[in-house]
Image (spheres, rainbow, N blue to C red):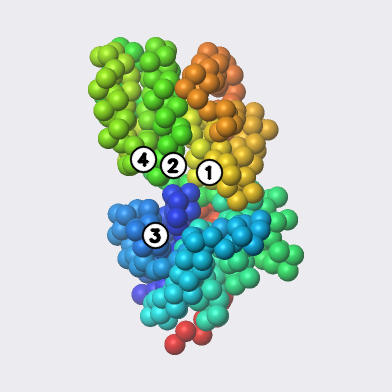
């Protein structure tokens, strides 16, 4: 049986990893019953969030060195200790990635962004292996701006992102949308209540899903903590807080009264229960990274987004504004975040069920359900028609 060797890279945050995993799973589904089989290798960062997620799917994983790429507005900003230390890691990572690419001999490389993707993409480009990169956000990230020079094709989530590519690379671009995990679909409200341990007698209460992304968001966690006594009077909360804050918030929960405890569920990380959580949630509250806003659109849920600022060019605010303009979300600026303000914003939204329903319907209009398939098809096309000189 013919094999197609696919090297996948991307990481640093869950927003870069989830699209890669969605495409891997789609390629596996396409190959089922076909006369070819995919062979994968995932190249990611050492000690990054991606390793556990990738290995859980049974995909071989290799970690390489990589320095974080940071924009700076001045020479002194560039010459910080972190930037200088990371500058030395990048060439080491390129050498390591070069060795892995030559050993694996991929037919094609799929890169979904993040600083760790740069060394494998540079190595593959220099070895004339076809490279497909994918950009999740409205703004092209620094890693992908570098990777674009070595890419054969560039997939975008948003049409407007093409204008931010270097002019000589724009002819490579095409729009697919952002792939989402199949695991977010098919959940049920009743199974969510049972799985999470909520009281079925309180099913008339709205449910808020708070998420800070794979690593959690400390400022959001602190605001939720301050808001709990008032917030839990009128809603239930599922709080994905990240591992760092898990024990602290569990201890905080123990200080609540019994009614409040029943209404507050803490999950440092979210796994297979995500589909049920999305089915139950009336409102999603969290950062507006690419993964969060894309999944909110895919499941048709309204959002209250608290963009992380600053990031490179304030990309999270731009992500959130796209949903706000469609009538699917509201924004709470991070600088204005506090327990009372968070409570006020949530109360305002969930007190108007008709508005929430309209926001959810508007979110669905932004969904791109074929994104994973379109990206998988592009990967296979490059593997079939590209030319690799790795021996």
Residue at image point 53% right, 43% down: 289
Could you tell me if the residues under marks 4 and 2 are in contact, i.e. CB atoms within 8 Å?
yes
Q: Nearer the viewer, residue 104 or 335?
A: 335
Mark 1 to mark 4 CA distance (whole Å): 15 Å
Instruction: Write down the residue under mark 1.
Output: 289
Q: Which of pointers 1 and 4 lies earlier in the amino acid sequence?
A: 4
Residue at image point 64% right, 32% down: 324
Q: Position of residue 187 (x, y in %)?
A: 37, 33
Mark 4 to mark 3 CA distance (whole Å): 30 Å
Could you tell me if the residues under marks 3 and 2 are in contact, i.e. CB atoms within 8 Å?
no
Instruction: Write down the residue under mark 3.
Output: 28
Q: Position of residue 329 (x, y in %)?
A: 59, 29
Mark whose residue sits in front, 1 or 3: 1
Residue at image point 27% right, 35% down: 247
Q: Position of residue 315 (x, y in %)?
A: 61, 46
Instruction: Write down the residue under mark 2.
Output: 213
Mark 4 to mark 2 CA distance (whole Å): 8 Å
Instruction: Write down the residue under mark 4.
Output: 242
Q: Is residue 83 left or right of residue 327?
A: left
Q: Which of pointers 3 and 2 lies earlier in the amino acid sequence?
A: 3
**Secondary-structure class at tag 3:** helix
Q: Nearer the viewer, residue 4 or 202?
A: 202
Residue 362 in view of the camera:
no
Quick one: quadrant of the C terminus?
bottom left
Mark 1 to mark 3 CA distance (whole Å): 27 Å
Could you tell me if the residues under marks 2 and 1 are in contact, i.e. CB atoms within 8 Å?
yes
């Amino acid at each position: 049986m013919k094999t197609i060797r696919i090297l996948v890279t991307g990481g640093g945050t869950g927003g870069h990893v989830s699209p890669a995993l969605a495409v891997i799973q789609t390629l596996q589904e396409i190959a089922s019953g076909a006369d070819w089989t995919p062979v994968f290798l995932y190249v990611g960062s050492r000690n990054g969030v991606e390793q556990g997620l990738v290995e859980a799917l049974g995909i071989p994983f290799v970690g390489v060195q990589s320095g974080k790429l940071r924009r700076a507005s001045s020479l002194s900003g560039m010459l910080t200790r972190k930037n200088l230390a990371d500058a030395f890691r990048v060439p080491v990572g390129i050498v390591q990635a070069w060795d892995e690419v030559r050993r694996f001999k991929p037919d094609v490389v799929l890169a979904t962004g993040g600083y760790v993707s740069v060394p494998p993409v540079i190595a593959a480009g220099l070895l004339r292996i076809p490279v497909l990169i994918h950009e999740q956000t409205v703004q092209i990230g620094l890693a992908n701006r570098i990777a674009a020079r070595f890419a054969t094709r560039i997939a975008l989530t948003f049409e407007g992102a093409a204008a931010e590519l270097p002019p000589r690379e724009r002819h490579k671009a095409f729009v697919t949308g952002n792939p989402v995990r199949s695991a977010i679909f098919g959940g049920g409200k009743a199974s969510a209540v049972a799985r999470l341990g909520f009281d079925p007698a309180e099913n008339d209460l709205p449910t808020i899903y708070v998420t800070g992304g794979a690593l959690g968001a400390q400022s959001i966690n602190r605001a939720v903590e301050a808001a709990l006594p008032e917030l839990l009077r009128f809603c239930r909360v599922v709080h994905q807080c990240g591992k760092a804050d898990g024990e602290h918030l569990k201890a905080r929960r123990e200080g609540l009264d019994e009614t409040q405890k029943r209404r507050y569920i803490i999950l440092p990380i979210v796994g297979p229960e995500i589909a049920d959580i999305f089915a139950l949630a009336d409102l999603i509250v969290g950062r507006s990274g690419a993964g969060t806003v894309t999944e909110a659109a895919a499941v048709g849920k309204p959002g209250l987004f608290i963009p992380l600022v600053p990031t490179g060019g304030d990309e999270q605010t731009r992500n959130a504004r796209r949903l706000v303009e469609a009538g699917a979300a509201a924004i709470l600026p991070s600088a204005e975040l506090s327990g009372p303000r968070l409570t006020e914003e949530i109360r305002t939204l969930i007190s108007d069920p008709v508005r929430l329903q309209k926001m959810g319907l508007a979110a669905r209009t932004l969904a791109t359900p074929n994104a994973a398939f379109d990206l998988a098809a592009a990967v296979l096309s490059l593997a079939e028609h590209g030319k690799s000189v790795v021996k």
